Amino acid sequence: MEIVQTVCEMRRQADALRYQGRKLVLVPTMGGLHQGHLALVRAAGRHGDHVTVSIFVNPAQFAPGEDFAEYPRGLEHDCALLAETGVVDTVFAPPEAQLYPRGQEHQVVWIQCEAYTRHLCGPRRPRFFPGVLTVVAKLFACCRPHVAIFGLKDAQQYFMIRRLSEDLLLGVKIVGHATVRELDGLALSSRNVYLSVDERAQSVALYQSLEAAREAIEAGATDAAEVEQVMKRVIGQAPLARLDYAEVVSTRDLQRISTIRAGEEVLAAVAAFFDKARLIDNVVVRAPTQI
Ligand code: PAF
């Protein structure tokens, strides 16, 4: 497993591998690796024959006051975990000046996806998606993957990155990987390390709220506002949780819906703070064909 730290070297390696006819797979991460990331990495091994994992805590996707400074970092430990999987060929871990050579405050081109940003995390974290889309485009430009794998816990990010690749003709196949969960249902996240014992116990409310939404939709609920109330009630039972949102959107265009139509596929998504930890989770549900 090789560690590459410069854009120039990463491009040189990717170009040479492409020239040899190898199929390149990228797993973009911000480090703080857990079993959820490692599941993406193992899946990457099945999608191609050269796996690169990028590790870069992207400053542009954090607003002032968010957890950029505290975000878990530990390149050595992350690399040890990646080496144990036996499938990673390259770790791309550039310092900030490699991806933002003028400094991010002097960069003038940013990628936006306004249509998919109107709901869920979009209005609450206005810098987040331009920061993510722009850094993912940079990572694609450096690592030149044929395939890139993203976790579906960040569903809104996944849907946007699919459109990033399609709309800008980047030619990268975007693969979504199912959310990996603790035994009680909590979605694995690098931010779970922020939780106290009591917060950890109550954080399962996010998953429970989504299961309640799934049950309601599968039982024939058609009023999206009612399903949102179901999710809010469950999260309301966790006194340490401060709800950020509980919304139902269409998976077609990520717009809020009022009526869930028969056979329609929807995304029920929640975000809540446990003190400084902001956790997100979601479930995709198809309504019964006959309601
Ligand atoms: O999902 C993440 O870890 C990040 O948003 C990503 C895609 C690596 C971009 O920084």
Image (cartoon, rainbow, N blue to C red):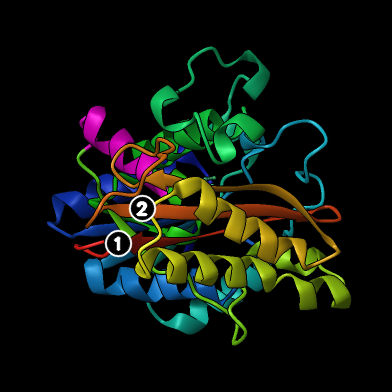
Provide the residue span drawn in magenta: 158-170
Q: Mark 1 points at which residue?
A: 286
Q: Which x, y percent locates residue 144?
A: 29, 44
Mark 2, residue position: 266
Q: Residue 165 carries which label?
A: none
Image position of 48 (left or right of 140): left
- Identify the amino acid type marked 1: Arg
Q: Could you tell me which secondary element the residue under label 1 belongs to? A: strand
Does the beta carbon of the residue at mark 1 sit less than 8 Å from ligand 1? no
| Residue drawn at x 69%, y 37% as measured from the top left | 62
Marks 1 and 2, Cα distance to the nearest angstrom? 6 Å
In the rendered image, residue 102, in percent from the top left (x then y), is placed at 61, 19
Figure quadrant of the C terminus: bottom left
Can residue 187 be seen? no
Relative to the observer, which residue lies in front, 139 or 249? 249
Where residue 119 appears, as percent x and y from the top left, is 52, 35
Residue drawn 84% across and 52% down?
Answer: 276
Q: Do the residues labelled 1 and 2 touch (CB within 8 Å)?
A: yes
Image coords of residue 220 (percent x, y): 35, 64
N-term mark: 1 or 2: 2
Could you tell me if residue 72 is visible in this image? Answer: yes
Q: Which of the 4 image quarters holds residue 176?
A: bottom left
